[in-house]
């Protein structure tokens, strides 16, 4: 016995009743939840009306803040100048260098930078370059001895007694 559930459901509910059910179950429940949320937000998170500031009051506040900040910056700049230059402010604080002073300064700076660069290069080479072990030097006499030994022909014919002696059979 099989029942077609689709037929039983659709036959008992008309399309008008379906619309009414959708309206009641879905749309009205969402509206109810929204109303509850709005009420709780109003109760727990009240919104205060924003303050209205007149244009004149706003302009005065801006001018006061800007003027105050600019005065602070100017005072800091004067303090920095005073600590940097001290009482030697103006034309007396500068001194023109002669060409000899400039030349000696340039050569000193150049020589120092060159020495520093060479020292860094030498240290890097000693630290990172490959340093192979010293090769063994063979004297001329030893080379001649090796040549004499290698140039002599080897014995290619052996007797049976010599072979037995080599292999330890005797």
Image (spheres, rainbow, N blue to C red):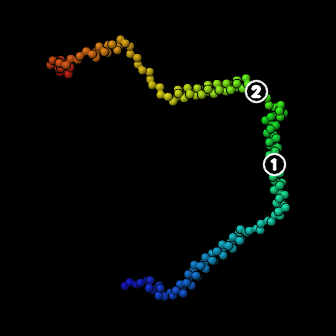
Residue 168 image label: none
Q: Earlier in the sequence, mark 2 or mark 1?
A: 1
- Could you tell me how far apart the alpha carbons at marks 2 and 1 are, in whole angstroms? 37 Å
Q: Nearer the viewer, mark 2 or mark 1?
A: 2
Going 71% across and 71% down the picture, which residue do you hit? 42
Q: Which quarter of the image is occupied by the N terminus?
A: bottom left
In the figure, 1 relative to 46: above or below?
A: below
Q: Which of 69 and 168 lies nearest the eye of the viewer?
A: 69
Q: Which quarter of the image is occupied by the C terminus?
A: top left
- 18 left or right of 107? left
Q: Which of 25 and 169 lies nearest the eye of the viewer?
A: 25
Going 50% across and 28% down the picture, which residue do you hit? 129
Quadrant location of residue 146?
A: top left
Q: Which of 84 and 91 lies nearest the eye of the viewer?
A: 91
In the figure, 71 relative to 80: above or below?
A: below
Residue 70 image label: 1
How many numbered markers are drawn? Answer: 2
Q: Position of residue 134 (x, y in %)?
A: 44, 21
Q: Which of 102 and 156 lies nearest the eye of the viewer?
A: 102
Going 74% across and 68% down the picture, which residue do you hit? 47
Q: Position of residue 48 (x, y in %)?
A: 76, 67
Task: Answer whether residue 69 is visible to the viewer in this image.
Answer: yes
Q: Secondary structure at mark 2?
A: loop
Quadrant location of residue 160?
A: top left
Q: Residue beneath label 2, please?
A: 97
Task: Answer whether residue 170 is visible to the viewer in this image.
Answer: no
- 58 left or right of 39? right
Q: Position of residue 83 (x, y in %)?
A: 80, 36
Quadrant location of residue 41?
A: bottom right
In the figure, 114 relative to 28: above or below?
A: above
């Amino acid at each position: 016995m099989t029942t077609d559930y689709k037929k039983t459901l659709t036959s008992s509910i008309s399309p008008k009743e379906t619309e009414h059910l959708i309206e009641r179950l879905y749309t009205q429940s969402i509206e109810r939840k929204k109303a509850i949320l709005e009420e709780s937000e109003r109760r727990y998170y009240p919104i205060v009306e924003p303050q209205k500031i007149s244009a004149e009051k706003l302009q005065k506040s801006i001018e006061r803040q800007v003027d105050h900040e600019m005065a602070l910056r100017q005072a800091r700049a004067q303090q920095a100048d005073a600590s940097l230059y001290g009482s030697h402010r103006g034309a007396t604080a500068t001194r023109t260098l002669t060409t000899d002073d400039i030349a000696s300064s340039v050569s000193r700076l150049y020589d120092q930078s060159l020495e520093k660069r060479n020292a860094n290069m030498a240290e890097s080479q000693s630290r990172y370059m490959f340093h192979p072990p010293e090769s063994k030097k063979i004297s001329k006499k030893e080379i001649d001895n090796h040549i004499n030994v290698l140039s002599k022909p080897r014995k290619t014919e052996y007797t049976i007694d010599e072979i037995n002696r080599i292999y330890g059979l005797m």
